[in-house]
Image: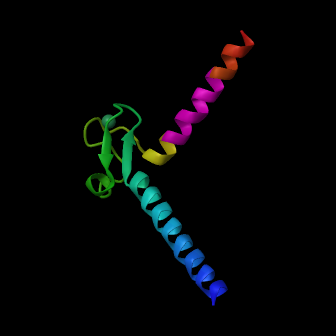
Amino acid sequence: MLDKDKALLLLVAGMVFIYFEIKYKSKYSKFYRCKKCKKVYNYADVKDNNKICPNCKGELQDYAEFKKEEYRIRKILSNRKRIY
Ligand SMILES: [Zn+2]
């Protein structure tokens, strides 16, 4: 009986974890950022624009991708500082 309860609890915990992971991921993939003017747009606002910025016609980038890139650049910069 106890093992069954434990299994159920584990299942519920796993489902809650997955739910929050999906929620978190979708939150960040729903934004686009312009490479040129750095404006951030809602995915819903620019999805028909073929990833072109309505403001400056620059290329739009997935905000999650941008965050990854920013992290990479920061890492490169901090490595460079160590060299000099
Ligand atoms: Zn722009």
**Nearest the eye: 58 or 31:** 31
Picture layout, residue 2 above or below residue 69 = below
The percent coordinates of residue 40 (x first, y second) are 33, 41
Judged from this view, the residue extending furthest toward the top is 84
Residue 37: horizontal and vertical position, in percent? 34, 31
Left or right of 33 in this view: 56: left
- The dominant secondary structure in magenta is helix
Q: Is residue 76 magenta?
A: yes
**Dividing the image into 4 quarters, which one contains the C terminus?**
top right
Q: Is residue 5 left or right of residue 57?
A: right
Which residue shows up at 55% across the image and 37% down it? 69
Which residue appears farthest toward the front when viewing the image? 2
Q: Compare residues 5 and 62 and report the one nearer the observer.
A: 5
Residue at horizontal 44 percent and vertical 56 percent from the top:
24
- Residue shown at the point (34%, 46%) measured from the top left: 52
Res. 81 image quadrant: top right
